Every structure is written in C-alpha cells, then in structure tokens.
C-alpha cells in the first residue's frame, strides 16, 4: 500500500464495477484516496472509453467486457443506470457456470431496483437454482460525497442468506464485511430494512443535489448584496458544513439550534420569515417525496 495505506484495513479481495460513471468513480476513487485498496485490485467495465480513460489513469484495470468483471472479482458493484440493469447482468453472468466455484456478491447501487427484481434478473440468465444461490445480492443506497470521505450509505441484504448452506453463508458474511468497509471508510454506513431504501435514497442519495442548489441560492443572495462570487460559495458551503456538524456532534434538535441563532426582532428571524413566506421547507419536503415516487416508478418498470 501507499504511505497513506493502513495495512490492517486493507481490502484483499478484488472489487469490480459494472458501469464506470459518476457514482462508481466516487466509490472507487474514494477507496484509493482512503488508501485501503491497491488500484490493481479494482476493475471497471463500460461500453465506451468515456469514463474508463480516467480509471486507467489511476492504475485501475479497465475493460469493455462485463463478463471479465465477474471472472476476476468476488465483489461486483453494479453501477449502471437502472434501465440497463438486465443487459448488464445478462452479459456479466453469461459465463458464470465456468466460475461458479467462486461465489459472488453483487452489490447494487441502483435507484429503485429491489433485491427481488435483481434476483429475478440473475435467474433469467443463470436459469438454475444452484447457480443462482452462488450469487448473493446486496442492495445499497450511497451518495457522491463518498469521493471526499463524507458519504452516506445504507444497505440491505437478501433474505435468502438464511437458507444457504453454512459454508456459502460464511463466504457471503465475509463479503458483507468487505462491502461495509467499502462504504464506511468514506463516510457513514448502516444496514437497514429494505423498505427504507427508497425513502432514504430520496433523502441522502439525491440529497447532495438539493444541497448544491441551496448553496448556489445562498451564494446568489450574497452576490446580489455585493459579496464576491467565489467568496460567497466558500462561505455558503462552510456554513452548511458547520451547521451539519452542529447537528451531528451536539445531537441537539435542529429547531432548537435555529432558535439560538434568531434574536428577538433581529436579522435572522426576518430571513426565516421570508423563507416561510415562499415555502422553502415545504419545497424540500415535496422534493424528497417526488424523488421517492420516481424510485417507486422505476421499481415497477423493473428494467
Ligand atoms: N449519481 C448519484 O448521486 C447516485 C446516488 C445513488 C445511486 N445512484 C445510482 O447509481 C447508478 C449510476 O449512476 P451514475 O450517476 O453513476 O450514472 P452515469 O454517470 O451515467 O454512469 C453509468 C455508467 O454505466 C455505463 N454503462 C451503460 N450501459 C452499460 C452496460 N450495459 N454495461 C456496463 N456499463 C454500462 C456507462 O458507460 P459509458 O461510460 O460508456 O457511458 C457509464 O460508465 C444509477 O443506477 C443511479 O440510480 C446514483
């Protein structure tokens, strides 16, 4: 490992990505930045070179063949758009009968696709119960701040694990520990019941986009009053970071912390009143609900 590497924490299994776009990069590059895996243990596949060029420059193995990922990696992270899930799974596992001696954990980061959907997609290509048992599905909901060590990931495991032979269960338990490490070296990671994944996806999976909009809007407000643009972005972002740390580190209710900033008859309560007039809080609640509804729609379409 490099000088920043922690030998005890090192991931010693190969980890492959099917799909090499924004989210895969945030996870893969986050792992390299944290120094917990050698780039040569990482593999990434995509149909074009558009994203793979960057992976190659980091010393990661790249390919246009999804099958190569399954051949080389016991942990396979599925990171394509949800509508390409079946295509990607079919091509990746088309030759699985030849490497089924090595069980595989398929880690999905796809919005909306349930563990059951993914197991059905696998069954479609494997057509065999014994083979299908050798692929364990873990469904995750990560977010892009993984890239800077402040990610937020929840995950659920397949219920079929409870019915497997003990040897296979042990291998999948070891894989699960690696998956937990992949997502917790760069942020918060917690196992949850699957019914919570879509609502949490609408909160923390999509959340960075809402927050960037808020940072941009706060910055626009300051620029309107004459604050230089770059300074306003830094101050807005730092204000969000500081406020988030106040909530996480003090454990106090956000409403209580807000009250402390609002002096009676002062400037901040005037600002809060303007926010309430245009319905900022309601807008954010609606945004989360809209994202949740969309993920339910995607789940119904399956692929
Ligand atoms: N973005 C987020 O913040 C976020 C958060 C949580 C979950 N997710 C989930 O993450 C997944 C990926 O999102 P993203 O934003 O990373 O998408 P993206 O940047 O568009 O990347 C998609 C990648 O998939 C590749 N691809 C397309 N068809 C493929 C196939 N058949 N086999 C293998 N690779 C294929 C693309 O190839 P090319 O490079 O050739 O185009 C690209 O590298 C989505 O399912 C989304 O629901 C995203």
Image (tube, rainbow, N blue to C red):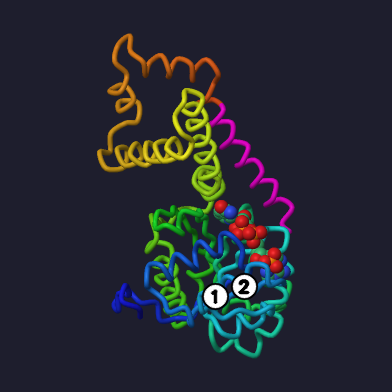
Q: Is residue 184 visible?
A: yes
Q: Under 8 Å from ligand 1: the CB of mark 2?
A: no
Which residue is at a point 52% across and 53% down the rendered structure image? 194
Q: Where on the image, by quarter, is ligand 1?
A: bottom right
Where the N terminus falls, by quadrant? bottom left
Residue 54 or residue 47, whichever sits in front: 54
Residue 278 or residue 281, whichever sits in front: 278
Which residue is at a point 46% across and 75% down the rendered structure image? 172
The tag on residue 57 is: 1
Residue 223 or residue 300, whichever sits in front: 223
The stretch of residues the image draws in magenta is 283-303
Which residue is at a point 52% across and 31% down the rendered structure image? 217
Please rate how many residues cluster around mark 2, counting C-alpha atoms within 10 Å: few if below 14, some from 14 to 19, many from 20: few
Check residue 290 for magenta coloring.
yes
Mark 1 vs 2: CB contact within 8 A:
yes
- In the rendered structure, the answer to whether residue 254 lies left or right of residue 56 reads left
Query: Which secondary structure class fits the magenta region best?
Result: helix
Q: Position of residue 78 (x, y in %)?
A: 60, 67
Residue topped by disc 2: 53
Q: Position of residue 248 (x, y in %)?
A: 31, 42
- In the rendered structure, the answer to whether residue 14 lies left or right of residue 269 reads right
Q: Position of residue 266 (x, y in %)?
A: 33, 13
Q: Is residue 85 visible?
A: no
Badge 1 marks a residue whose secondary structure is: helix
Q: Measure the alpha-carbon separation of dots 1 and 2.
A: 6 Å
């Amino acid at each position: 490992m490099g000088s920043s590497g922690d030998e005890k924490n090192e991931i010693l299994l190969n980890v492959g990505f099917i799909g090499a776009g924004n989210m895969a990069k945030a996870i893969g590059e986050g792992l390299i930045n944290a120094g917990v895996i050698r780039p040569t243990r990482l593999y990434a596949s995509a149909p074009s070179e558009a994203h793979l060029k960057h992976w190659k420059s980091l010393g990661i193995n790249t390919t246009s063949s999804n099958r190569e990922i399954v051949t080389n990696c016991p942990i396979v992270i599925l990171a394509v758009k949800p509508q390409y899930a079946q295509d990607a799974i079919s091509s990746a596992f088309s030759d699985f009968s030849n490497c089924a001696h090595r069980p595989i954990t398929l880690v999905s980061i796809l919005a909306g696709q349930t563990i059951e959907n993914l197991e059905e997609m696998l069954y479609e290509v494997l057509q065999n119960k014994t083979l299908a048992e050798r692929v364990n599905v873990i469904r995750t909901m990560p977010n892009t701040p993984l890239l800077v060590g402040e990610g937020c990931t929840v995950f659920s495991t397949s219920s079929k694990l409870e019915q497997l032979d003990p040897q296979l269960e042990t291998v999948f338990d070891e894989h699960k520990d690696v998956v937990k490490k992949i997502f917790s070296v760069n942020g918060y990671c917690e196992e949850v019941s699957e019914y919570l994944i879509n609502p949490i996806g609408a909160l923390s999976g999509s959340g960075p986009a809402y927050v960037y909009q808020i940072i941009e809007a706060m910055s626009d407000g300051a620029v309107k009053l004459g604050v230089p643009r770059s300074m306003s972005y830094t101050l807005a972002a730092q204000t969000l970071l500081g406020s988030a740390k106040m909530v996480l580190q003090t454990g106090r209710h956000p409403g209580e912390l807000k009250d402390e900033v609002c002096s009676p008859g002062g400037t901040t309560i005037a600002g809060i009143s303007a926010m309430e007039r245009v319905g900022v809080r309601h807008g954010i609640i609606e945004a989360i609900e809209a994202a949740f509804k969309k993920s339910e729609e995607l789940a119904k379409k399956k692929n």
